[in-house]
Each structure stands twice: as structure tokens, then as C-alpha cells.
Amino acid sequence: MKFLLKIALLLITLFWQLATKGQTDAGAVLDTNAILIGDQINLELSFTCPADYKVEWPKFNDTIITEIEILEKYKIDTAYSDDNSQMHLRQILKITSFDSGYYAIPPFHFNYKQPDDQLDHFAETDALLLAVSTVPVDTQMEIKDIKKPIEAPYTFREALPWIIAVFVILIITYFVFYYLKKRKKAEPIFKAAHKPKLPPHTLALNALDDLRLKKIWQSGRIKEYHTELTDILREYIDGKFNIPAHELTSDEIMEAINETATNKQAKEKLRQTLVLADMVKFAKQQPLPLEHDGSLNNAYDFVKETIHLAAPAVDNQTPEQETVNIEVEQNILSKSPNITNSANSTDSADLTSSTGSTNSSTQQSDNSVTEQISNSTTQQFSNSTTQQFSNSTTQQFSNSTEGKEVKDV
């Protein structure tokens, strides 16, 4: 009875192992079983089992056996059946051998566990045979020299860095030569773009316009106002008549202007402006508001009345510069009535302001007396300002300076 029980248990175990083995499959395949020394082939390992099995993959070092080396190990690929019940694992090993002979590759073991089972199971592949042979040598032939390396064609991509290097060297050489040449001649390496030079009368009128807009004397800076005004005139005379006006006194400037074709009226206006400026700068005279604008108007008139006079030749003047000068001159002449009207309106405004301040200070005494004084003062000043200014300021300036030359500060 006990014997029959043992036989039954043995049969049950055998059938169970056969059933389990039918669910797993381990395989190992070579690309070829015969290679030459140094050739590389693939060894493919595969294992198929139910999807819920836990599989332990074989571990490899650098060799399978001593004579067979593993060059590369690829990742393990996993694939599932259509119903996800079976799992197929696959890995490729790239191997080679440098010893001739016949080598047996032993079976590969795959350990796995079934779900709800603590026992370890395994499956193994079949053993493989690999034949490694040397290159056949004909001993009857003469020994030949090693073949030379095959020369690959030289491509444009390989030559491109050399071409770029040659161009860079040429450019650097050119700039070094250019720099040394300019340095030897003491010339600037990079010249600034040439701009057309404006004529002197354009520069002067623009400067006078700026001076009027600044309203310097209205803020109490009388000396600064007349200094800037005379500087504009001196700069204009220097550029227009080629007279070094910045280095001359007012008398010397007038002597030089007398030798030009300037009309008497323009000369007189210039003289009045210069004399009043000298009286302000050196005698600390405080001119009337009308005299400040009178000097500015005289400067405007002097520049406009001398525009058409012959100007000194300008070296290296391009046709574009001459065209710009002609156009600017025409624009100034076309706008000159507006400049005069602007000056007259400013004079009238300043005179009215001055007269208004006089009227307001005396209005409490007598309105009729204030009106009479304002009218008579304005009429008398407008008729005799120029004559009184030219006589009194000249006499006062000559007495205060005691014959010394007065130069512009």
C-alpha cells in the first residue's frame, strides 16, 4: 500500500513538471557556427513564459568562456502575446574569438518563480558549438609586403577649414599692412563721414535765433548775453571775410570791415553792437531793455546785408556743399521778412512791458500824467535812441578805458 502511494506521488510530480515545462521555453541561437579569427557574430538568447512569472536573467562578464569574448551586450527586449498571457524576453550578445579551434558554449540557465509559489524553478538552453578557424595560408607562395592604406578622395568639406584659414590670414595681413601704412603717414585709420559745411551766414543766423530763444538778458545775465552776441558776430566775420575777429579789438574789427564792400548802414549797426557790448563788459553799463534787442536786431541786419558779398574761397568744397550753401541761402532770404517781423514784435513787446511797468508805478499819482509821460518818453526814445547811443556810449567808453585797447573776453 505504501509502495502504491509513493508511485502515485511520483507520477503526480512528473506530470506537474511536464505541465510546467510546457509553459516555458529557453533558447540560444548563433548567426553562424563557423567564423574566422576576429569575426564578430550575434548570440541571441530568448525566454518565453507566462506573463506573471518572475524571471532572473543570466548574468555575464566579459567572456562566455575563456576563448569567446563578449564585445557588446544589448538591452533585454520584452514583448507580450495578443492576449497578454505570455511574455517573450530577448537579448543579443555580440561575441568574437581570437583563438582558432572548436568551442562548446554551455547552456544558459534562466531562473524563474511562479506566482504564489516560493520554489525556484529554472530552464536552460541547448549547448552550442562554435568553430573558429584561421585564414588559410598558401605556403608555396612568396611572402608579400603589407598593402598600403587605401587613399580616400579629398572632399571639399575637408578642405573648407583650410580655405577659411587662408582667407582669415589674408584679411589679417591686409589690415596690419593698412594700419602700418596709415600710422607711417600719421593718418586716421577710419575717416569720419564728410558732412557738407554750412555757410557762415547760416551758422550765424541759427546762432542768433538760439540766442533770442534763450532769453539770457531777461534773466539778468546781461554780460553773458552781449558776450555771446559778439562772439557770434566775430565767428561770422572770421568765416565770411577771413578776418581773425577773435584776436582783434572792436576798433580793429571796424578798421578791417571798412576795407570790405560792406555798406555804411551795416557798418554802423555792427559798430553800435560792438560798442554797447564793450560798455557792458568793461564799463558795467546797464542798457535799457530796448537796447538789448536793438543789438540783436543790428546783428541780424548786419548778417543779412552782407550775405551777397564776395566770400573767400573754400578749399576742398565739393559740388554737394555748394548746392547746400545755395539752397540754405535761398531759404534764409525767403524767410528774412519773418525774422524782421519777429524782431520787431519782440521789440514792441519789450517796449510795452517797460512802458507798462512805468505806467503801473505812477498810476496812483495821476493817470493823465502817466499817459503823457509814457507817450512822450516812448516817442522821444524811439526818435533819438540811435543818435544818443552812438554819441554818449562812444564818449563814455573812450573816457573809461583811457585809450587802452579793449579786447573781447
Image: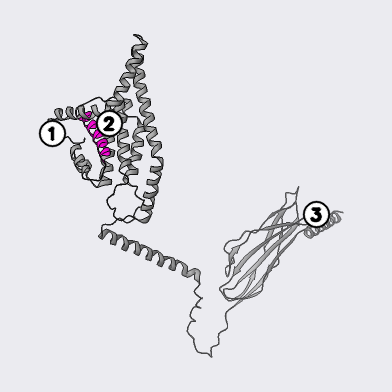
**Magenta span main SS:** helix
Residue receiving disc 2:
224
Highlighted range, magenta: 263-282
Quarter of the picture holding the C terminus: top left
Q: Would residue 193 be seen by someone viewing this image from the given angle?
A: no
Depth order, front residue of 127/196: 196
Residue 67 is one of the magenta-drawn residues? no
> The residue tagged with tag 1: helix, strand or loop?
loop
**Residue 376 location (% of width, % of height):** 31, 19
**Quadrant location of residue 319?**
bottom left
Q: Which amino acid does label 2 sit on?
A: Glu
Residue receiving disc 1:
404
Tell which circle, 2 or 1, labels the residue nearer the N-terminal end: 2
Tell which circle, 2 or 3, labels the residue nearer the N-terminal end: 3
> The residue tagged with tag 3: helix, strand or loop?
loop
**Residue 4 location (% of width, % of height):** 86, 56
Residue receiving disc 3:
83
Q: Are marks 1 and 3 in contact (CB under 8 Å)?
A: no
Query: Looking at the image, which residue is at 26% across and 37% down?
Result: 270
Lateral position of residue 338 relative to residue 240, left or right = right
Q: Is residue 219 above or below residue 66?
A: above
* Disc 1 to disc 3, C-alpha distance: 123 Å
